[in-house]
Amino acid sequence: MVPQTSASVVVALLMGLVGVWFVLWQLRHVLSYDTGNKTMQTIAAAIQEGASAFLSREYRVIAIFVAIVAVVITTFLQWQTALCFVIGAVASAGAGYLGMYVAVRANVRTAAAASRGLHEGLRVAFGSGAIMGMSVVSFSLIGMTVLYLIFKGDPNHLTYITGFGFGASSIALFARVGGGIYTKAADVGADLVGKVEKGIPEDDPRNPAVIADNVGDNVGDVAGMGADLFESYSGSIIAAATLGAALGGKSAAAFIGLPFLVAAVGVISSLFGIYKVIGKAADVTVATPEASASLQARAMYYLNRQVAKIDENASLDDLLKALRDSVWGASAVVLVLSLFCVIASGVHFNYWLVILVGLIAGNGIAYTTEYFTAYTEKPTQAIAKATQTGAATTIIQGLAVGMMSTVAPVLITAFAILGSIWLGHAADGTMAAGLYAVALAGVGMLSTLGVTLATDAYGPVADNAGGIAEMSGLPKEVRHRTDALDSLGNTTAATGKGFAIGSAVLTALALLAAYVTAAKIESLNILGPTMLPGILIGAMMPYLFSALTMMAVGKAAHEIVLEVRRQFHEIPGLMEGTGTPDYKTCVGISTESALREMILPGALAVVVPIVVGHVLGKEALAGLLVGTMSSGFLLAVMMANAGGAWDNAKKLIETGEYGGKGSDSHKAAVVGDTVGDPFKDTSGPALNILIKLMTIVSLVFANSFGSGWLSF
Amino acid sequence: MVPQTSASVVVALLMGLVGVWFVLWQLRHVLSYDTGNKTMQTIAAAIQEGASAFLSREYRVIAIFVAIVAVVITTFLQWQTALCFVIGAVASAGAGYLGMYVAVRANVRTAAAASRGLHEGLRVAFGSGAIMGMSVVSFSLIGMTVLYLIFKGDPNHLTYITGFGFGASSIALFARVGGGIYTKAADVGADLVGKVEKGIPEDDPRNPAVIADNVGDNVGDVAGMGADLFESYSGSIIAAATLGAALGGKSAAAFIGLPFLVAAVGVISSLFGIYKVIGKAADVTVATPEASASLQARAMYYLNRQVAKIDENASLDDLLKALRDSVWGASAVVLVLSLFCVIASGVHFNYWLVILVGLIAGNGIAYTTEYFTAYTEKPTQAIAKATQTGAATTIIQGLAVGMMSTVAPVLITAFAILGSIWLGHAADGTMAAGLYAVALAGVGMLSTLGVTLATDAYGPVADNAGGIAEMSGLPKEVRHRTDALDSLGNTTAATGKGFAIGSAVLTALALLAAYVTAAKIESLNILGPTMLPGILIGAMMPYLFSALTMMAVGKAAHEIVLEVRRQFHEIPGLMEGTGTPDYKTCVGISTESALREMILPGALAVVVPIVVGHVLGKEALAGLLVGTMSSGFLLAVMMANAGGAWDNAKKLIETGEYGGKGSDSHKAAVVGDTVGDPFKDTSGPALNILIKLMTIVSLVFANSFGSGWLSF
């Protein structure tokens, strides 16, 4: 039994190491690109400095939190869980830091590369995204497998490893919330004074908040999102392994090992997908004298000849197709390879179908997300049309679109859960097997994370590259190319968000099932005395959380507005371009306020489940989690999609529809876009984490809850 | 046993008749006021005509729906349930029609009375609201008690009577949705062209949509709200009686009778509360020679001397205090009298505490609602402050305030449920007794509905009176008085909304418990195979429903905008005041589009539970209801309060803050107010009904559901 599990875990560890090797190789490759002219380098340095400063300060604050929680865990639970918790936090922070490190260096290189062509720019930006994607996957796999191998003799080893997920969740929450507040405060603040009051364009170097805005893209959209998916990825594997162990029987080892194996083949598939996009880049590398790279590159050359569909004159549609093909291709590879995993594990064939269900659901949600947010489709066009009657109808229509967009993801998720439970139940005849299948579907959905995250994380790099091109006065066609890459990124980001939210629900459900097992809850009657109060309070949490984060963005943006106004007022010649703006103060304000404002919502997410578990009891806590999961899912999808649709409605108008830039319609669209900013980049995505964090906190502390002080 | 129940029911029937007698007497009184000058009468006639036209057409559409459902019920269930269903629909429609009938006649009389003084205006408007409030209570009580007495020999009599609730729910849904779409389409449409494009003030007679706007206040805010609360009121009593019967034992008759008794004493208390406000009006009536009135009036005279605190020079604060005192006074009377009911019924003293819990919870939710929406308080002031940085920050802050405002109502409701269950459980030792207690708390919360609805329904009358004063060029001080009454109405409307949503949740929970009993569901494990899919789909329903209703408002408003623009373009001299606008076409468009757009959301609410019950099974349906209840509760509170807060933030600015009327801040506030319109008057309140209707549909069809086609 144990040997079989260990073998799977070792395979996963090895694939994690392969991922790290790819990350290092690709890092070297991306950094080998040229960094453009002097001005570009200066701007890039300012962004790098701001991002590093924020991330180090953020991590210092989080470190205090991690230390406190580690002490609490050691005191009330076990030191092993505390250790796993710390390692989970460090691994997630490490992946986030690395992703951010390369993103703030790839931006200027993308700008320089875009001077030479669209595909050249894509290679650099996507390469940077791939580093983020593969670091997340590899660091997570290595962390979990090593801890597994260390503790595997201990009967509680899987309990300890939930600590890893908790650590990852904590980082994710603070990184998402802190980064999200930072990025939107800077963005909204910069726009409100720059675009609205002063009438200067976006990314204008005269705007004192422009560097903070660019820093924000990296700390929020790169580091924050990386941490978010690190957590989903780890959480889904931990949940599946825990539920697999609970299944018991002679196949327990196989059930525990399977998610690791699927994750392992996911690494291969993701690398395949990544090469479908940057294949030519590898091609280029063949000519370089670096041995390790060229060895790999030669191996890839043949593959590339088959798959690389992009050439230098590729149109945007071709690029989009290439990105799509890479994700779909990776999914196909996972499916083929995981069939072997299922056969090798000796488990029922249905579990392969479960992985298929997970992948179909993930891609299905992604597809509908794209439908609701792409400006080629009706929903976003309806928003653009509503701008004609002003800002109010723009907002109403956008909210309605966001609400409507929840229908398909909910139905897909509901049927994925139903289908997985059915398949698991049919395979092994128990409800427990059904819940294990749900967790496995989550693992399947996230197995190609390496490449889906890459398509997501390259967007902010392209966005930054555009900012640098604008600020350093590069020729118009460069900016057009970076804009094209950015808009491509917005579309593919929808895919990433679809996977993020879908997997969050499946993972949270699986973790909830693990919690119910761990807390030894026997009956979970929905009409039990404390259940409905628990559900209602749980359903309220996402609203409270969103209110706090949105107000935080408002407050922080207000501080930026005051500072930018002050600078325009006090620095002579700033508007005329002869004065030098003080970028650093704006960066400092964003940093301070983001860190200050992330504490309360972050602490709430950890404290509320513990309080409810003790006061209302463990059954009410299960209700709380169900309430948060269902209400949070809906609110998150609504906010993310409304935000995306407003953004693209504005972009549609900027192509010249309904009067184009500067028209009244455009002004109304800008209002929508600004409202959508905290929706899609702060509050919405943070809800994914809220759902998972609350569940994993409950799981970690499951043993400490009784029937509650208020129960009877 | 039966005699005791029958006695309680007969008492309730008698109090219902007393209520009808009050309604007729007050109707005569209100209609005896003078109707002002010729212009006022012409405008009022146009509003009356439009409102009657809409309501008759709306009821014709609903009649078709009612007929179809009645046939379905007769075919698949029993003819008795179908009969109750039809009578429930007719009673609700009758109360709504009567309320609307008097409201469109009281408006012009209020305008005329306001020429003579503030309190005189309040008397007429509040008298009209009292007619609505008491008709709802009386028609509901009479309908239910008569049906009870007819069917009491049949062992299924309580099952039949759920049909009454279903009929009331159906009317409520269509009236709320149809009326809500009508009122906001006309309002938004009138404002978008009038205020925004043409720069003419609100209620300007040159605006072709102005009559439609005024009609909307009546069909939406009066008839729609009346039907909404008719349903809550009936539903809470039915749920309590059904659960009481399920308790069995020797006290079953007492348990069934108690909610009727509490409702009966609620009628007395409401009359007491109403007299605290319009006492002096009764005073005036003493001088009239009408025998029946004067008899009553003489009896009331002594009482009035004690309680009437208002005189002609009352300030707004005094009036607000008077309205508050009337609600609080009625609550106090209910508490005292229901103590006798509990003692007389011979049930445990705890059930009196449950009624207390219900009343405290209702008033508590009302208080927090007021806090979040009053412009004297921080949340609304924060929105007003946010208008300084434009429409986008206004929207963000408003949404954040709306989300934040969910916390207290959720906690209050959660603890009311917990407390009621605890009290019931402690009294009779079963969970079933606990759930009965929840239903009884809902009855307690709504027992004073006669007066709370009066304070709510008088607002639109005052609003209309202001419109008529403006359009017929009455002196400025008249408009000031009607504005004062209107703003008072906005504040007290918050109270009404608090009771509406709080009671909706308690009633829905009680109906859910009744459903679970009726469907013979044995285990409702939250981790059962179909439960979580059910919960997720349920949580999605309020979003789908809100999206549909908001889009409907948008579409209908757009049609109005085009028509108003056409008229300004084609009718010569319209802008100069020499041309005559074609009000009728706008009324016709509002009517057509509201009726067209209400079908889909209305049908969904009925069809989805039935489909889920059959396809996913009866357990999943319970999950669906829990999901809809929790997610709908949150969304409804958020939308209602955000809408109210935006409205009052605009009013605050109109008092001169942040630049006052016409400033950029004011423009931003108008955007917020316009977004808030469908929030607070269409989608938000309709969610209350969605929650209850879906639950009562499930209850009525409970016997027809099995384990589901997709279950295993």
Image (spheres, coloured by chain):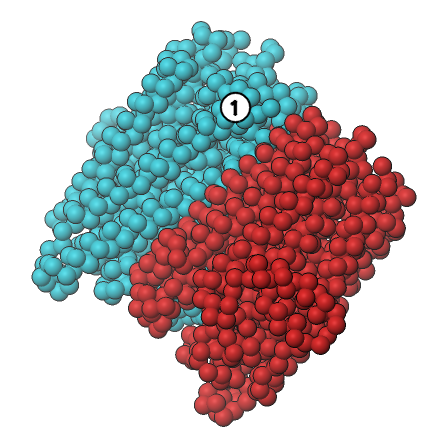
Chain colours: A red, B cyan
Instruction: Determine the chain carrying the residue at label 1.
Output: B
- The amino acid type of the residue labelled 1 equals Trp
Which residue: 71% across, 77% down? A289
| Front-most of residues B63 and A341 | A341
Q: In this figure, which residue is indicated by the disc labeled 1?
A: B709
Residue B128's image quarter?
top left
| Front-most of residues B675 and B4 | B675
- Picture coordinates of residue A112 (x, y %)? 56, 79
Q: Is residue B596 left or right of residue A77?
A: left
Question: Does A321 sit above or below residue B435?
Answer: below
Which residue: 52% across, 62% down? A309
- Picture coordinates of residue B413 (x, y %)? 57, 39
Which residue: 58% across, 83% down? A36
Question: Does B599 sit above or below residue A50?
Answer: above
What element does badge 1 sit on?
loop
Which residue: 37% across, 68% down? A655
Residue A689 in view (yes/no): no
- Picture coordinates of residue B135 (x, y %)? 34, 30
Mark 1 surroundings: few (<14), some (14-19) or many (≥20) residues within 10 A: few
